[in-house]
Amino acid sequence: MQSKATTVKQYLDELPEDRKEPITKLRQQILDNLPKGVEETMSYGMLGYVIPHSVYPEGYHCNTKLPLPFMNLASQKNFIAVYSMVIYSKQEVMDWFTAEYVKRCKYKLDMGKSCMRFKKMDDIPFDLIGELTAKVSAEEWINIYETTIKK
Protein backbone atom coordinates (compact mmCIF):
# COMPACT_ATOMS: atom_id res chain seq x y z
CA MET A 1 0.00 0.00 0.00
CA GLN A 2 1.68 3.11 -1.28
CA SER A 3 1.67 6.18 0.91
CA LYS A 4 0.76 9.61 -0.45
CA ALA A 5 3.16 11.23 2.06
CA THR A 6 5.58 13.69 0.52
CA THR A 7 8.03 13.85 3.43
CA VAL A 8 9.64 11.28 5.70
CA LYS A 9 8.09 12.96 8.75
CA GLN A 10 4.62 12.81 7.21
CA TYR A 11 5.13 9.13 6.35
CA LEU A 12 6.19 8.30 9.91
CA ASP A 13 3.35 10.33 11.43
CA GLU A 14 0.77 8.46 9.32
CA LEU A 15 1.91 4.98 10.34
CA PRO A 16 -0.56 2.79 12.25
CA GLU A 17 0.35 2.61 15.95
CA ASP A 18 1.49 -1.03 15.77
CA ARG A 19 3.96 -0.16 12.99
CA LYS A 20 5.53 2.98 14.44
CA GLU A 21 8.05 1.27 16.69
CA PRO A 22 9.29 -1.40 14.25
CA ILE A 23 9.52 1.05 11.34
CA THR A 24 11.33 3.58 13.55
CA LYS A 25 13.80 0.92 14.71
CA LEU A 26 14.41 -0.33 11.16
CA ARG A 27 14.81 3.22 9.89
CA GLN A 28 17.34 3.96 12.62
CA GLN A 29 19.35 0.84 11.75
CA ILE A 30 19.38 1.89 8.10
CA LEU A 31 20.36 5.49 8.91
CA ASP A 32 23.10 4.35 11.30
CA ASN A 33 24.61 2.14 8.59
CA LEU A 34 23.87 4.12 5.45
CA PRO A 35 26.91 4.33 3.18
CA LYS A 36 28.31 7.77 2.44
CA GLY A 37 26.62 9.14 -0.69
CA VAL A 38 23.22 7.55 0.02
CA GLU A 39 20.37 9.78 1.22
CA GLU A 40 16.95 9.26 2.76
CA THR A 41 13.92 10.53 0.85
CA MET A 42 10.40 9.53 -0.11
CA SER A 43 10.53 7.14 -3.04
CA TYR A 44 7.68 5.16 -4.61
CA GLY A 45 5.44 5.99 -1.64
CA MET A 46 7.94 4.48 0.82
CA LEU A 47 10.95 5.57 2.80
CA GLY A 48 13.65 5.54 0.16
CA TYR A 49 17.40 5.40 0.39
CA VAL A 50 18.87 6.59 -2.88
CA ILE A 51 22.04 7.75 -4.54
CA PRO A 52 21.11 11.32 -5.49
CA HIS A 53 21.81 12.94 -8.83
CA SER A 54 24.58 14.98 -7.16
CA VAL A 55 26.49 11.70 -6.71
CA TYR A 56 25.17 9.77 -9.74
CA PRO A 57 23.86 12.29 -12.32
CA GLU A 58 22.56 9.61 -14.71
CA GLY A 59 19.80 8.61 -12.28
CA TYR A 60 17.72 5.47 -12.54
CA HIS A 61 17.55 4.02 -16.06
CA CYS A 62 13.79 3.36 -15.82
CA ASN A 63 13.24 7.08 -15.22
CA THR A 64 16.39 9.20 -15.29
CA LYS A 65 14.59 11.99 -13.40
CA LEU A 66 14.66 9.71 -10.35
CA PRO A 67 17.78 9.08 -8.26
CA LEU A 68 19.34 5.63 -8.25
CA PRO A 69 17.47 3.38 -5.74
CA PHE A 70 19.51 1.62 -3.06
CA MET A 71 16.98 0.45 -0.47
CA ASN A 72 13.37 1.10 0.59
CA LEU A 73 11.39 0.55 3.77
CA ALA A 74 7.61 0.32 3.81
CA SER A 75 4.66 -0.50 5.99
CA GLN A 76 2.44 -2.61 3.74
CA LYS A 77 -1.06 -3.86 4.54
CA ASN A 78 -0.04 -7.17 6.13
CA PHE A 79 3.69 -6.79 6.70
CA ILE A 80 6.71 -4.52 6.85
CA ALA A 81 8.90 -4.74 3.77
CA VAL A 82 12.56 -3.99 3.26
CA TYR A 83 13.47 -3.66 -0.40
CA SER A 84 17.16 -4.13 -1.14
CA MET A 85 18.51 -3.74 -4.63
CA VAL A 86 21.91 -5.00 -3.48
CA ILE A 87 20.70 -8.34 -2.11
CA TYR A 88 19.33 -9.34 -5.51
CA SER A 89 22.27 -8.04 -7.49
CA LYS A 90 25.17 -9.53 -5.57
CA GLN A 91 24.97 -13.27 -4.87
CA GLU A 92 27.49 -13.22 -2.04
CA VAL A 93 25.34 -10.66 -0.19
CA MET A 94 22.25 -12.83 -0.74
CA ASP A 95 24.11 -15.91 0.54
CA TRP A 96 25.41 -14.04 3.58
CA PHE A 97 21.99 -12.56 4.39
CA THR A 98 20.06 -15.83 4.13
CA ALA A 99 22.64 -17.69 6.24
CA GLU A 100 22.59 -14.99 8.93
CA TYR A 101 18.80 -14.77 8.89
CA VAL A 102 18.44 -18.45 9.77
CA LYS A 103 20.82 -18.01 12.71
CA ARG A 104 18.99 -14.98 14.11
CA CYS A 105 15.29 -15.53 13.42
CA LYS A 106 12.79 -18.19 14.38
CA TYR A 107 10.43 -17.74 11.41
CA LYS A 108 11.11 -18.69 7.80
CA LEU A 109 12.49 -15.91 5.63
CA ASP A 110 9.73 -14.52 3.42
CA MET A 111 11.37 -13.03 0.34
CA GLY A 112 9.81 -11.77 -2.83
CA LYS A 113 10.92 -9.77 -5.80
CA SER A 114 13.56 -7.48 -4.28
CA CYS A 115 11.94 -7.52 -0.84
CA MET A 116 11.94 -9.20 2.51
CA ARG A 117 8.54 -9.29 4.23
CA PHE A 118 8.18 -9.29 8.00
CA LYS A 119 4.74 -10.29 9.27
CA LYS A 120 5.83 -10.96 12.86
CA MET A 121 6.97 -7.70 14.40
CA ASP A 122 8.74 -9.56 17.21
CA ASP A 123 11.02 -11.40 14.77
CA ILE A 124 12.43 -8.57 12.69
CA PRO A 125 16.25 -8.82 12.61
CA PHE A 126 16.89 -5.10 13.10
CA ASP A 127 20.66 -5.45 13.44
CA LEU A 128 20.86 -7.71 10.39
CA ILE A 129 19.07 -5.09 8.28
CA GLY A 130 21.61 -2.55 9.52
CA GLU A 131 24.46 -4.85 8.52
CA LEU A 132 22.86 -5.41 5.11
CA THR A 133 22.64 -1.63 4.62
CA ALA A 134 26.39 -1.29 5.16
CA LYS A 135 27.41 -4.26 2.96
CA VAL A 136 28.29 -2.17 -0.10
CA SER A 137 29.39 1.42 -0.59
CA ALA A 138 27.59 3.84 -2.88
CA GLU A 139 30.48 3.53 -5.34
CA GLU A 140 30.27 -0.27 -5.32
CA TRP A 141 26.48 -0.15 -5.81
CA ILE A 142 26.89 2.19 -8.80
CA ASN A 143 29.42 -0.23 -10.30
CA ILE A 144 27.12 -3.23 -9.74
CA TYR A 145 24.20 -1.28 -11.20
CA GLU A 146 26.14 -0.21 -14.29
CA THR A 147 27.61 -3.64 -14.99
CA THR A 148 24.68 -5.93 -14.19
CA ILE A 149 21.39 -4.04 -14.22
CA LYS A 150 21.52 -0.97 -16.43
CA LYS A 151 22.47 -2.82 -19.63
Image: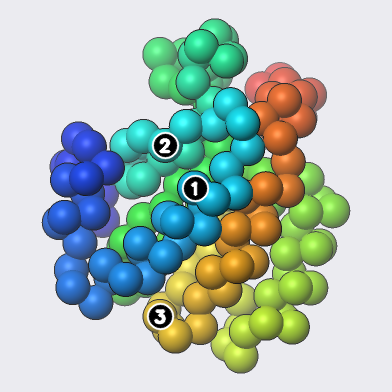
Counting from the top left corner in percent of width and height, residue 3 is at 21, 48
Residue depth check, mark 2 versus mark 3: number of the one nearer the observer: 2
Q: Are marks 1 and 2 in contact (CB under 8 Å)?
A: yes
Q: How crowded is mark 2: few (under 14 residues within 10 Å), some or many (20 or more)?
A: some
Assign a secondary structure to mark 3. helix
Question: Toward which corner of the image does residue 112 lie, by quadrant?
Answer: bottom right
Q: Residue at x 73, y 41 (%)?
A: 136
Q: Distance between the residues labelled 2 and 3?
A: 23 Å
- Residue at the image point whose x is 32% and y is 71% from the top: 21
Q: Pointer 3: residues within 10 angstroms few (<14), some, or many (20+)?
A: some
Question: Horizontal and vertical percent for residue 39?
Answer: 47, 32
Residue identifier under label 2: 40
Residue type highlighted by circle 1:
Leu
Q: Is residue 22 left or right of residue 62?
A: left
Which image quarter is the C terminus in? Answer: top right
**Along the horizontal axis of the image, is 55 left or right of 64?**
right
**Residue linked to disc 1:** 31
Pointer 3 residue: 121
Which residue reaches farthest right?
92
Q: Nearer the viewer, mark 3 or mark 1?
A: 1
The kind of residue tagged 2 is Glu
Residue reaching furthest to the front: 32
Mark found first going from the N terminus, 2 or 3: 2
Q: Where is residue 76, by image quadrant? A: bottom left
Q: How crowded is mark 1: few (under 14 residues within 10 Å), some or many (20 or more)?
A: some
Residue 68 in picture, x, y percent from top left: 53, 26
Visible residue check, residue 89: no
Left or right of 127? Residue 2 is left
Q: Could you tell me if residue 5 is visible in this image?
A: yes
Secondary element at image label 2: strand
